[in-house]
Amino acid sequence: MSSPLAYVADPGNPWFSAQYLRDNSGTVLNALREHAELTGQSVLIAAAVAIPLAVAAYWFRRLTGPILAVTGVLYTVPSLALFAFVAPYLGTGTRTVVLGLVLYALLLIIRNTLAGLTQVPAEVRDAAEGMGYGRFGRLLRIDLPLALPGILTGLRLATVSTVALTTVGVLVGHGGLGQLILGGFRNNFYKAEILTGTVLCVLLALVLDLAIAGVGRLLTPWAARRVAA
Amino acid sequence: MNPLEQAFAWVNDPLNWTNPGGILDRLGEHLVISVAAVAIGCLVAWPLGLWLGHARRGGGLVVVLSNISLAIPVIALLTILPLTFLGFGRAPVIVALAVFAVPPLLATAHTGVLQADPEARDAALGMGLSSGQVLRRVELPLAVPYLAAGFRTAAVQVVATAALASFVNGGGLGQIISAGFGLGMAVGGGQILAGGVLVALLALLADLLLAAGERAVTPRPLRRARRGQAGRA
């Protein structure tokens, strides 16, 4: 163990550096926490808005076109532009980032939820009606459970892309791990910082994706059984 | 003045269009970067995707590639690539965007060939066409609507992500937004909003134009509302 004061000839600028992680664990963990929080909030809010909209599109065929068109435009608009729209009004806080990410994630959840809802077999719907289910009863007990695979696909897609997009939040100073990535670039091209941010970002996306997939398996045991059979 | 009025004032100033680093400059940079990135993406992804589809191989690879690419932040590649052998300048920006253009191009080329009517392939083989001729004269023409759909997805996505090049000072319309943030919200708010509108309009315009192109090369019976998975930025 060398003394911390020992002269180091050339620390170099490696892509991987355990030293960097040891010295900056606080910063890294804070960035990771902010990233996870921003992603979580955005996806939850997006789901809370998108799933009712998908149900509305499912119930009222006339709304399907407009809902998909508007969210499609929001999805096509670059996230940087979404942040730029919101920032002058909400300022440079986390609210700007969350709103931008929510607007972006809507389409993925709506489209997949709607796909899940529309593939509920007509016989099942007829049977539910015959058993006396009303509109809401059918939705809660029949349609939504059967649409769960679609909803979960939408949530997974939205989560993975939101994790990647949260980094764009550096524009307003709240990019989670994006702060590390761009911070490293601006801090004299500190490779270890850039790569730490990148790797953690991809890992976070992977972990959240697997977590939602796992929850999905627990919620839809019939789907797993069907695959196994 | 509220931000909207500021934005109007900013766009209405002719100098903001013609100055060095003005809208026209940035638009030119944006288009050059985007076109180069999409061209490289096509050169790499189309031959590979067509061949993989023709050989009935690599389906898993295509899926894995598009899933992984979804999880990698664009900013990561934009900051990492200049530190590699590519060096600073426009090349790393173009390569970074091209990397994200490849998965949709590859996937659509692959499915485009796979979905070609097997009876048409059999008939072509029965007529004595070689494997390469089947690919060029039967499968490729049948895959054109898919190639067009993938091209649209990839190109719109590249135009959208090119705005992020401003983070590494790579030029493009995003530069207007970051310059606005540099001025602070009180002064630059209008410029930020105006830049956002310009970036958004360009992406939507690209999507509209390419949708028309996609429609033109898709035979009428196949024209259904097949919305591409545009955008990731």
Image (tube, coloured by chain):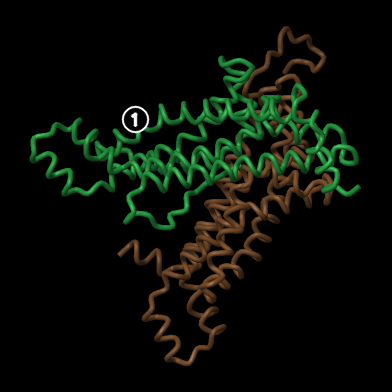
User: Which residue is at 85% across, 47% downward?
Assistant: B5
Q: Position of residue B66 (x, y in %)?
A: 46, 41
Q: Quadrant of residue B90?
A: top right
Is residue A182 visible to the viewer in this orientation of the structure?
Answer: yes
Task: Please identify the quadrant where the N terminus of chain A is shown.
Answer: top right
Q: Is B162 or A19 nearer to us in this picture? A: B162
In the rendered view, would you say A50 is above or below A199? below
**Residue of label 1:** B47
Q: Is residue A180 left or right of residue A135?
A: right
Q: Nearer the viewer, residue B42 or A147?
A: B42
A3 to B93, vertically: above or below: above
* Identity, as a three-letter code, of the amino acid under mark 1: Pro
**Secondary structure beneath disc 1?**
helix
Judge by depth and name the residue closer to the eye, B214 or A197. B214
Chain in green?
B
* Circle 1 residues within 10 Å: few <14, some 14–19, many ≥20: some
